[in-house]
Amino acid sequence: MTTDAGVMVRPRPGLAAWWWVPLLILAAPLAGTAMGETPIALGTVLRAFANQLWDAGYAVDPIDQGIVWSYRLPRALVAGACGAGLAISGLVLQTLLRNALADPYLLGISAGASTGAVVVAVAGIGGAFLPMSAGALLGAMAAFGMVTGLARLAGGGPTARGAAQIVLAGIAGSQLFNALTSFIIARSASAEQARGIMFWLLGNLSGVRWDDVVLAVAAVTTALGAAFWHVRSLDAFTFGSESAASLGVPVRRVQAVLILATAAATAAMVSITGAIGFVGLVVPHAARLLVGSRHARLVPASALIGMVFLIAADVIARMLVPGQTLPIGVVTALVGAPAFAVILIRARSAA
Amino acid sequence: MILEARHVRRRVRGRTLLDDVSLTISTGEVLGLVGPNGSGKSTLMRLLAGLVRPDRGHVILDGRPMADLSQREIARRIALVAQSAETADRITVRDAVALGRTPWLDALSPWSAQDDAEVAHALRRVDLAHLALRDWSTLSGGERQRAHIARALAQTPQILLLDEPTNHLDIRHQLSVLDLVGGLGVSTVIALHDLNHAMRCDRLAVLQDGRLQALGPPAEVLNPAILAQVFGVRASALIDPQDGSRIMRFHPID
């Protein structure tokens, strides 16, 4: 009967075991706010919060107050939301496409979103009716449709060769949409605009405002909610989409809902920060190493790791070169590209 | 629980994969599906599992057309073990089998002690309880097939569909999978290649080019005419002196 005991008992930690999760969600943006080229003491940060939230009236240097509340805090919050959202998007794409290399950036979804955002912002098409994030969503959906369609025509699927086809289709899509973006900028943008947009395209958190925080948090909440609602369906994709269907998962509907939710999240993030690469690719793999393959744990773990990763990347981007802030996409690529290489090699040996 | 195909046809891009096939799976029987490669066995399996729709005819489950049932309602009654369902995920045998509970769970009805019991029971039935916590990638082909069957059993289905479950297994594991299926007491449709294995089924359906050529008890169905027409072989029957059972030896027809 000892083996039976092994079968029956599944370690199921109670809610109490997760006390550190809300703490981490509070602590990470706080740390992101305190750290920077000029560190601000945690006490000052907290006092600045108190002043802002309930007029506590602590004596805080008005410059520090401004930096904490209007500059660093929204920046850290957007970084956190963005990291969580991109990580969830990557995880969902990897699961639905059965492809270890799926990621909104590699599949060209971010590039499509950039094009959509630029079309609205620069060319002014639909500018009176559409916010930039809606343009980004349309671009993201167009890119996803094009890339998966192309991959299907090229024989993409859950096999090793099919996996490569999807990534190749993603490259084609990225190139096309990046070219479109450049074309629109070259045609329609002034030199001043063009410089700003090129900086934004690299993935950039400068100039983030509280409006952006609201959008980013709403987007990540939507994606996270959709993913949480479907954790069992996502698990059912372990042996492929046909197996999921035979387990009672309405495959098409689940795919449509989840891809729409993650594309929306990606589009919202891109419209705020530009295309930040490699977060969606690398973070879910790190999460799998830590908590295994079941989505009930994988979804929250990816979101948390993504949040911490991007807040940390932003701190590094602000501190690496004195007197200058690097685009955050540069930092994530410096970490992500080698990790991508490792995943590529491991995916080959697993196939 | 009765599953029935009525004059089903399926065409994909102008090619007819299945044409005018009618058969009924009755309670408790093991129905074998035999036929050469490309004869439509897998297509029929997928139709019976509700994964694809026939473009003519109906699949009827318990008196209701399958087209009226949701994927989840079907999955609570019918479990499919498809060919070559593999994963690169790091997942324990227990978690793979637990996937079988998916049709009974959703975001609002979480995993319960009963689900634990069903999974443990399924693992015991296929004799894999001792491997429950092993990683999927460490299993042999035979163990994986047993785990897939356990996953299907965890769905507590009334009908089990097995698409060539003995494929790519060594002979010992082929026999153990067949013994397992025979002893389950669940209505089963099983696609098989080896005609001597097929002799163990209660009834056989013979498919050729998407058409049903014969349906009935194995000894009647695998007659010289069908063997020649469908499989292009003739058989000499031998009696196993150990238990008196009849086995066939096949020769090509010149």
Image (cartoon, helix red, strand yellow):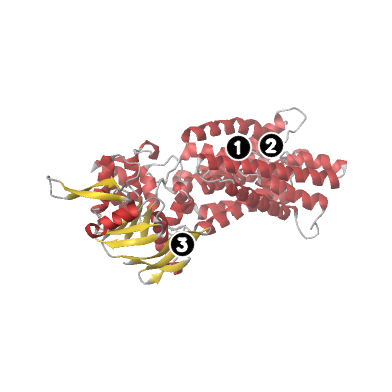
Label 3 Cα crowd, 10 Å radius (few <14 / some 14-19 / many 20+): many
Chain name for mark 3: B
On residue B10, the disc is 3
> Is B77 above or below relative to A31?
below
Which residue is identified by label 1?
A309
Task: Provide the residue designation for mark 2.
Answer: A329
Asked if residue A260 is positioned above or below residue A329 in the image, the reply reads: below
**Secondary element at tag 2:** helix
> Who's the residue at 33% across and 52% down the image?
B231
Marks 2 and 3 in Cβ contact (< 8 Å): no
Q: CA distance from mark 3 to mark 1?
A: 50 Å
Q: Nearer the viewer, mark 3 or mark 1?
A: 3
Question: Residue A46: percent from the left, percent from the top?
Answer: 66, 41
- Type of amino acid at the residue the image marks with label 1: Phe
Label 2 and label 3: CA atoms lie apart by: 50 Å
Distance between the Cα atoms at labels 1 and 2?
Answer: 12 Å
Residue B158: percent from left, percent from top: 31, 61
**Quadrant housing residue B161:** bottom left
Q: Is residue B195 left or right of residue B18?
A: left
Could you say whether the residue bearing mark 1 is in a helix, strand or loop?
A: helix
- Chain to which mark 2 belongs: A
Task: Examine the rendering and report whether any part of residue A305 can be seen.
Answer: no
